[in-house]
Structure formats: C-alpha cells, structure tokens
Amino acid sequence: MAWTMAKWPSAWQLSTLLLAVGWALSFSVMTACAATANLAAKYLNPQLTATHTMPLALMTFTTGLTNVILPLLFRRLGRWPTYVLATAMGLAGSFLCLIAIQLASSLALLLLGMVGIGFGLSAGNNYRFAVLLLGVPKEEHAVASSWVIAGGVLGAALGPEYAKHLQLVLSQPYAGVFIGGAVAYALHMFLLFVGKRMLHFSDGKARSSDEPAAESSVEAPAPALPALPRPLSAILAQPRCFA
C-alpha cells in the first residue's frame, strides 16, 4: 500500500517524520565529527600521534556499547525518556568538545565530549526500529523504516556541509563545528518534547500517566504487543549463537 497524500497526515506518519528528522540531526553530528574530530585532536596535541584517531574511535565505541544497553534502559526508563537522556548527553558532549578546543585546549575534555556524542547517536540509530512501535500499519512498516533511514542520508550530507562552513568561525580551528553539533542536538531535543504526545510506543512506557486510555464501543481482543528486545545475555545463552 503506497503512502499517498490522500491519507496524509495520520498520527503515525507525523511521528515517523519526527523520528526521521531527529535521526537526520543526530547523524549530521556524527558525519561532522567524522570529518573534523580527529583533526581537532591533532591540533590539540600534535606530538602524541597515537591519540589523533581516538576521538572518532571513542565515539564509535560508545555508540556500539550503548546500543547493547539500550534494551535495559528501555525497560527501566521507557523509550521516550531514554531518547531524551541520550539526546541530552549528545548536547552536553557537543558543548564539552567546544569548550575543550576553544577555551581549555584539553584533549582529555575533547575525548570526554566525544563519549557524550556517541551516547547521543545510539538513540537516533534506534529510531528505525522504534518507528514500528508507533501504530504503523503492518503493510506500511517498510515505508516507515525507509523514511527514518532516509533521514540518516540527509544527515550524512548535512554534517560535512555545516562542518565546512563552521570550522573556522571561532578563533580556534574546528571549535565552531561543535556549535553546529550543539544546535543539532538542541533541535532534536525540541522535536522530542514537541512530539511527546505523538510518540506513543507500544511497549507501554512512553504514554504519560495522565493521558486517558482510548475507549472503544466494540469489545475486541487486545492485539499482541511487540516484545521488547531481549538482553544480550539471553541471546548469547542460545546454543546457535556459538554454532
């Protein structure tokens, strides 16, 4: 079934666009950092060449590690609070990187900021799965996921573009790139709060407690809810994992 303008806009379509734009903003920070973070490390400490690739490596490692623990955070906090927490970490990480280059000339602070940015990326990376929990009709699952992934494609082009224009906007090279990163995460946070009432994930954690449940005049069996992601320990315990 095609996603036509005649059916626009339904709640799940608006929610899908919100997540797609959020992922575009987050991924733009990733691609901007990929273009400049290691150069910033070299600028801060040109003699210690072993550290010149550490910012991007730390960001990537943190994103992967956080993806492993996201199911636990979803169970404890809910999806929407987890996404807000991750976006806040990305925003804080961008500011730390800005301070590290512009004010402190500190490689350690730059690396700490990259950890925060990596945490922020993990949430946006999960949106292509989360969108399927927003009441998307089964026949539209592929379309919804594709729109979120398309947001990442947009971010891949946006990040290097603003990095090119902002890298020399401040007195210290590359510091301005993280102004762009902070703005991207701030806009992402704004979208999450604006769309809070739209993001009703069917794992049951994102709906606010004061929101009444939908009433129906026709008794019908409740549909089965998608299971939450299994912990990594449960996956590794399966014999096939080592086959």
Image: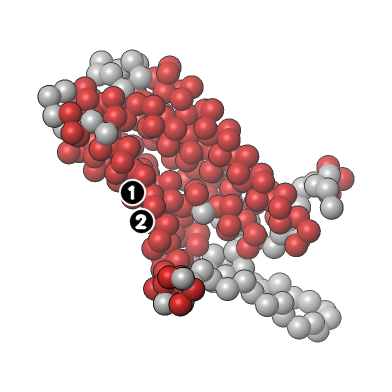
Q: Which x, y percent locates residue 219?
A: 81, 84
Q: How is the image coloured?
A: secondary structure
Q: Is 45 on the left-hand or right-hand side of 77?
A: left
- In the image, what residue type sits under mark 1? Phe
Residue type at numbered disc 2: Leu
Q: How many other residues sit within 10 Å of disc 1, few (<14), some (14-19) or many (≥20)?
A: some
x 31%, y 30%: residue: 37
The answer to whether residue 49 is visible is: yes
Where is residue 6? Give x, y as percent: 87, 45
SS at mark 2?
Answer: helix
Left or right relative to 103: residue 10: right
- As helix, strand or loop, the secondary structure at mark 1 comes to helix
Disc on res. 65 = 2
Give coordinates of residue 59: x percent, y percent: 33, 43
| In contact (CB < 8 Å): disc 1 and disc 2 | yes
Which residue is more in the foreground, 167 or 194? 167
Determine whether, in the image, residue 208 is placed left or right of residue 84: right
- 70 vs 10, nearest the viewer: 70
Q: How many marks?
A: 2
- Is residue 101 visible to us here? no
Q: CA distance from mark 1 to mark 2?
A: 6 Å
Residue at 59% across, 52% down: 128
Residue found farthest to the right: 6
Looking at the image, residue 14 lies above or below residue 41 = below
